[in-house]
Image (spheres, grey):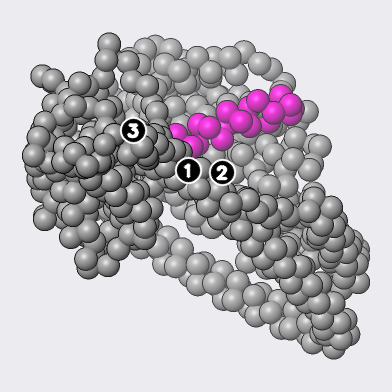
Amino acid sequence: MKKQRYTFSKKTLLKYLLLIMSLLLVAVLLAQFCQRKIAKPKTDHTEEIKRLTNVADVYFDTDKKDSAIYTFNKIKALCDPKTNPIDYVYAVTCIAELHQKNCDYIASEASATEALPYLKDIKNPRYSWIVYNILGINYTHSYDNKNAIVCFKKAIKLKTSVWRKSLAINNLVVVYMEQRKYKEAAILLNILASQKNISSYDAANNNDHAYIVDNLGYCYYKLGNTEKALECYYEGLKIRLQPQNDDGLSTSYKHLSIFFQKANPILAKEYAKKAYDHASKINNIMERISSLSLLIKSTDGNELKKYSLKYIQLVDSINHTNKKVKNQFSNIKYNFNKDRAENLQLKALKTESHLQLERQKNRIIISYVIIAFVLMLILFLYFYLTSKGKKEKNDAIFSSEIRISKKLHDELANDVYQTIAFAETKDLEKDENKEQLLNNLDNIYFRTRNISKENSNICTDKNYPQAVKEMILGHKASEINILINGFDTIRWNEIDKNKKIILYRVLQELFVNMKKHSEATLASISFIIKNKNLHVTYIDNGVGIKNNTLILKNGLQNVESRIKTINGTIIFGNNSQKGFKISFTFPL
């Protein structure tokens, strides 16, 4: 039979591809056009941002935290961080710092984190330094020392002023002191103590130096070097006792009180009292509480009772104040969000009527483009898959025809020719010649029937197990015994139809190969399911693989290719004693 060929014209395929590309290009151009048309007109808020920033700065400097947060939130809402990152980052960092002053470190971290994506757009490293410093302080107060160290080290690496680097190093030192890494802290503090005039303001230089030497003294104290510790404490105290340099004076007194607690309790009490008096003078509640804790340790009797009551009152007062501040801030945040929502709603109502018609038109156009594209894609896939299916079908028919033709030629042509020659040359009147002729004709008949069976349709319904058994046992003869193990334990109705057909053909090829080539007298086939895979093992006692070399020809090559089509694996080999062995596995 002449092979029919169905081909999908390359020219037609090219036309479809060009059409699809054109549609895609039109869709992209339309999408860009629509995006430009419906783009919201931008309003310049520069002047309003500048005005509000001045107002917010005044609130910030006068410690009106609630008003400052409210105003900076307004600035944040007006800023576009992509086009105006500086004003946006300034607003969120100020909000973060105000939350930090209110001891709301979680809210402070959240605000500072909002600035991180836009730091890369700002050339001045000062803003990055501010953000990392705020985050580091928040992590320090939240006892997340690991992240605090990361942030402070990032701040130190930035190309900022010496004063900013010094401040970041100081903050890093505080973390080391919290971790009781006093040796590392002392090394950094000694470096800072050797630097002079790192700020342009004398008062700032004095305060910074006092802070450094006082912390250095505390590190020496913890490291057991009491002589150097006391020397540093007194140096820091001397600076802080000067006018305009009293920032941190309470801390100096507290450190000295701790230093003398065991050696001189009376002097320790005196320094603790001075620390409390100075904290009361500057109205620093946290310093008063920490000073009172030292006085409680240094007193007894009525004094102990008096200071204990003051301590309890202050702790209760600060808890009440914190709750009040948080409630006030919640109200401010709610009012701001409410105002912003109302403003956005009004803007949306004004613009919606103008944009609705344009959006509708654009949607219709885009919908048409998408529909056209989908239809063309469906048509293309239909023609392509139809052509491919016809080609594969014809290839399969052609392969079957070649295989059947070869089988007829190899297995029957010679026998028919020999039978004809026998009939022409022998005297058929003799009984033995007549018997031989009949045997030859029977042999030709059985071979023809086998070829017919090999290429007939395979039953895959409930009768499939019976069909497989009949096929296997059909190769049994008086000199060949066949054993089947585990066949009835398999649930054949749960196996895919295509896999049943492949298995049938593979077994057929194996037993045909056994009968023709192996010279076996005993063959066995076993079936077992493991891990949702069907394992089949075939063994015979025939000639096996010669010289450990397997040549894949005809049937065996078909076996391998068929198993691979169902994602299976196959292993060829000799039987352990004598003969041939093959095992294959495929997923169910």
Residue 135 image label: 2
CA–CA distance in space, label 1 to label 2: 83 Å
Q: Is residue 387 left or right of residue 574?
A: right
* Residue at which label 3 appears: 425
Disc 1: which residue: 405
Q: Nearer the viewer, mark 2 or mark 3?
A: 3
Q: Is residue 22 above or below residue 564?
A: below
Q: Label 2 is placed on what type of residue? A: Leu
Q: Amino acid at mark 1?
A: Ser
Residue 556 makes an appearance in the image: yes
Which amino acid, by three-letter code, is at mark 3?
Answer: Thr
Magenta: main secondary structure equals helix
Q: Which residues are magenta?
A: 146-164
- Point out residue 343 in the picture as x, y percentages from the top left corner: 76, 80
In primary-sequence order, the first of circles 1 and 3 is: 1
The foreground one among 51 and 478 is 478
Residue at 71 percent of width and 76 percent of height: 340
Nearer the camera: disc 1 or disc 3 = 3
Query: Residue 12, located in which quarter of the rendered image?
Result: bottom right
Task: Give the foreground label among 1 and 2.
Answer: 1
Whether residues under marks 2 and 3 lie with C-beta atoms below 8 angstroms apart, the answer is no
Measure the C-alpha gap from mark 2 to mark 3: 110 Å
Residue 62 placement, left or right of 179: right
Per the image, label 1 sits on a secondary structure element best described as helix
Viewer-nearest residue: 116 or 421:
421
**Residue 586 position within the rendered picture, expressed as x and y whole percent measured from the top left:** 30, 44
Please tell me which residue is depicted at 12% across the width and 41% down the height of the picture: 477
Nearer to the camera, 255 or 443? 443
What residue sits 23% from the left and 45% below the top? 438
Residue at disc 2, secondary structure: helix
Density class for disc 1 (Cα within 10 Å; few <14, some 14-19, many ≥20) is few
